[in-house]
Amino acid sequence: MTANPPAQTWPKAQAIASEVRRRILDREWRQGDRIPDEADLAVEFGAARATVNKALQVLADEGLLDRRRRAGTRVAVDPVRKATLTIPIVREQIESAGMAYSHRIFAHRPSPAPESVAGKLGIGPGMPMIHLRAVHYGDGIPFQYEDRWINPKAVPGMDRVDFRHVNANEWLVRNAPYSRAEVVFSAANADVRDARLLQTRRGQALLILHRATWNEGQPITTVRIACKPGHEISANSQP
Amino acid sequence: MTANPPAQTWPKAQAIASEVRRRILDREWRQGDRIPDEADLAVEFGAARATVNKALQVLADEGLLDRRRRAGTRVAVDPVRKATLTIPIVREQIESAGMAYSHRIFAHRPSPAPESVAGKLGIGPGMPMIHLRAVHYGDGIPFQYEDRWINPKAVPGMDRVDFRHVNANEWLVRNAPYSRAEVVFSAANADVRDARLLQTRRGQALLILHRATWNEGQPITTVRIACKPGHEISANSQP
DNA sequence: AATCTCTCTATGTCTAAACTTATTTTGCGT
DNA sequence: ACGCAAAATAAGTTTAGACATAGAGAGATT
């Protein structure tokens, strides 16, 4: 059916998904329309219902379809509005750009959680934490400045690590798995400290990331990352 | 086994996924470890292999597991590094904050694609496009300023729409489904025009979003969005 | 040692059939 | 007209069984 030249040894479910996607994008099936039910599509595509189900679930996750029991499957009125952001490890990011990675620690000491940090993590202020400030460089040029607070109770083995040699970001990613993460983007004018550490001028617009991670409700770490001027972070839609 | 009080009438595959997730987060299975194969887990959980497969695929998508044929399944060394960003419709965003939405068009005319736009979309410069500049307000206060280029060939019916009454963002979302989208975050100091339209001062740091969408390789639209000072955009990890 | 086979295994995928469950529809009683 | 209960339907989920396929590991060849 439907002259399909690039019909290779593709997984059947994916083939069905992309055919359905095509029909939606080409407006054969329009926003809000009800599409044939799984059984009918199974017959049309010569597949089992389970295979069709799998394909449609993918499209529903993408946001292209709305599915409800008994009511059937409809083309979503507000289609695809999701993008996936891959959180990079700084070192890999710098090295994959062909630059030499290095970093420098500007502070690393126990300190009670200030109000702002406690608020973000949902804990009481004054809780003992580790405060870490560091700059990451690519070929010796400042790449990003991170100001991090770590909850030592949530990360066993923290005290035995020497962050002068090991990258905190990386160590945490590998040793403190989390169940929930939050990333917030914003922009700020560089203050005196930002400007000094990133070797730029005061007032320069910087892309700021706030990240926080929890494991089963227990806060692990929160960090403010100031990126070098002009830095970009991109996200893509998956299909 | 393993006293599991909150074992409700949950879908079995999800129950398996969260149990495996728990074992990883609790370090029963550590980074790089090979975990039992599907057949063994199926026996342990009293489920069919297909069900275990489904559960493990979810965790692999999340980035918690690395799976390879014949080599088996291992706990990822660099776990979960993905976050999902939901792209909002401006009007909904403003209204859900309890503010009254309004917008104003500052330019709306056919214009050949300048170099910068052509480059982003991967087309030749000079292609005829529609250029649109608008500001969205919440309770009359500037919320974001968008500078958009639309490829009329990719969006049939464009010419019949009056963007003074209909929101471009919204109309496009509903009428120009896309197969690929890209979002890029950056920061910039407000220039004279940004400052005027957003009612702020020159030099103010602004969060900038560049978005572009394609349908089957054909460019639909690209837009530069300048958010009001202090604006934040957040993303979350899904589990 | 290095390289080329072959074999075997764990995951990838599909199927047919059954059961479950949310929700709509229908039809009954008032 | 109205409300309610029963029937019907479409998606959600699971299962056992089968075959496909990547790729690690063993063994043979150079």
Image (spheres, coloured by chain):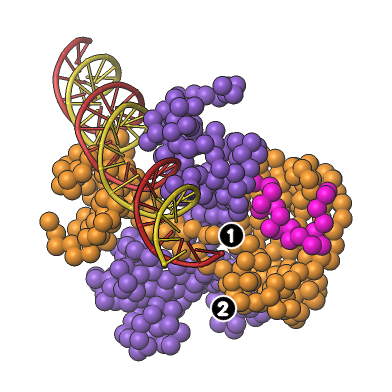
Chain colours: A orange, B purple, C red, D yellow
Q: For mark 1, give the secondary structure.
A: loop
**Mark 2 chain:** B
Q: As displayed, is residue D24 above or below residue B20?
A: below
Nearest to viewer (mark 1 / mark 2): 1
Q: For mark 2, give the secondary structure.
A: helix
Q: Is residue B230 visible?
A: no
Task: Answer left or right for B52 relative to A38.
Answer: right
Q: Tag on residue A52?
A: none
* Foreground residue among B199 and A53: A53
Q: Residue at x 82, y 65 (%)?
A: A105
**Mark 1 chain:** A
Amino acid of disc 2 = Asp
Residue A30 lies in the magenta-colored region: no
Q: Are marks 1 and 2 in contact (CB under 8 Å)?
A: no
Residue topped by disc 2: B194
The 10 Å Cα crowd at callout 2, few under 14, some 14 to 19, many 20 or more, is many
Residue topped by disc 1: A87
Q: Residue D4's x, y, as percent? A: 29, 16
* Foreground residue among C11 and A217: C11
Q: Residue B202's x, y, as percent? A: 65, 80
Q: Residue at x 41, y 87 (%)?
A: B114
Residue A167 lies in the magenta-colored region: yes
Q: How many marks?
A: 2
Q: The magenta stretch spans which residues?
A: A159-180
Quadrant where the N terminus of chain B is found in the figure: top right
* Foreground residue among B71 and B44: B71
Q: Residue B167's x, y, as percent? A: 39, 66
